[in-house]
Amino acid sequence: MGQHRNNMKKDRETRGEWEPTWSSRAAEEAEAVAAIPCSGHGRVYLDGLILKGHEPVCECNPCYGGSDCSKLLSDCAANAAGGDPYFMEPFWMRHAASSAILVSGWHRMGYSYSDKSYISQLLVEYIKKLHAIVGNAITKGKYIVFGSGSTQLLNAAVYALSPNSSMSPAKVVATAPYYPVYRTQTQFFNSRDFSYEGETSSWKNKTDKNSIFIEFVTSPNNPDGKLTKEVLEGPNVKSIYDRAYYWPHFTAIPSPADDDLMIFTISKLTGHAGSRFGWAIVKDEAVYEKMLTYMDMNTMGVSREAQLRALKLLDVALEGDGKEIFQFAYSTMRDRWIRLKEIISKTKRFSLQKISSQYCTFFKRGRDASPAYAWLMCERQQDKNCYEILEAAGINGREGSLYSADNRYVRLSLIRSQDDFEILINKLKILVSKE
């Protein structure tokens, strides 16, 4: 490793380039780590290398092992359960120089920015610019709140929309199939101001002036990728729109969303789930202020390093008005969906959700389906637990009951690494061929 640094230094001196001082070691460590190939089936990260006496170690993708990740493990199940968006990794490797960032040891050590807030106003402006270029959300005249991923913002929104404790608790509902965190998070916090009250179907035409309803709406939906709208109506119904997947690589953008409260996350935009950064676009100032209070009491805002990284990533994403990143991501997801559909079309035992092609205002043309997840159904009467059927075939998904749906359904993640996807495809081919 030391020899590699010396060679890099000599190269710079030969070219007569500016010589960095305190940053050189950190930059060389990052370059050295990135240069280790791990046979193309894993990565080396900086975590251990920055400590003295530690050597870089390959972290292998699922189903690969060995010191350099070159060994394909037999009898290994396909990981189609997790939502880690590794499908974006090749894009960022192509943009290694423009997306890299080096942080000094004294970077923003204080609690707040110079304006005494926990929110980078420059990042706010970049978020607004991004939505204007993509055309997926209206931000004019609205407020923006940052959170540690969309997860933190979901409960901040519920808190902000709930009445004070002198009234009856707000009823939190969602339409199946829905993202299970809506239910589990609401129940976990066990607040006197709100409670989880099941599916919207149980409350349709039953809303009254004595109860506040908070409806979660995921559009595109997780797990089936469909564009959805709120079900309940009435002056006491408030909606939280989870727009995590409302980007051109997962769905057509028919028009900019203009909901009263919308939540987005960088994890499904750039793929950086580990950075834990999300934002809410809020119409009502009082709701915005309550969400800020929640963030103040909870974590005093989002890590300054996370905001800095998000700013750098959005700067790259906005190059060429976003055409490169969204074309790469859309092509990847579309191709995966086409390959999956081709396999499933050869059997009557399984079926996939139906998503029609639609005109997209960002691409300015019709676009084919490219959902983040496959919502697979076991069609045979005797296959009552589709998760177990797939598990026996070496495929790990997520059972339908997690999404308050029938267990004849399984969610299969299509956004993981190419290795994960290829293993999934191969397992499905074997399963279908046995029919």
Image (cartoon, rainbow, N blue to C red):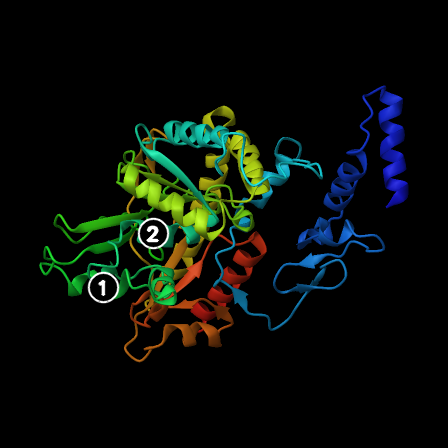
| Badge number at residue 362 | none
- x and y percentages locating residue 294 in the rendered image: 40, 49
| Badge number at residue 199 | 1
Relative to 49, residue 9 above or below: above
Q: Residue furthest top?
A: 16
Q: Is residue 433 left or right of residue 76?
A: left
Give the amino acid at mark 2.
Answer: Gly
Q: Is residue 16 in view?
A: yes
Q: Nearer the viewer, residue 272 or 213?
A: 213
- x and y percentages locating residue 27 in the rendered image: 76, 37
x 51%, y 50%: residue: 85
x 31%, y 53%: residue: 158
Distance, label 1 to label 2, CA atoms, is 19 Å
Quickly name the residue at label 2: 225
Relative to 275, residue 360 above or below: above
Q: Secondary structure at mark 2?
A: loop
Which image quadrant is residue 265 in? top left
Give the amino acid at mark 1.
Answer: Glu
Q: Report crowding for label 1: few under 14, some 14 to 19, many 20 or more residues within 10 A (C-alpha).
A: some
Q: Secondary structure at mark 1?
A: strand
The earlier-in-sequence mark between 1 and 2 is 1
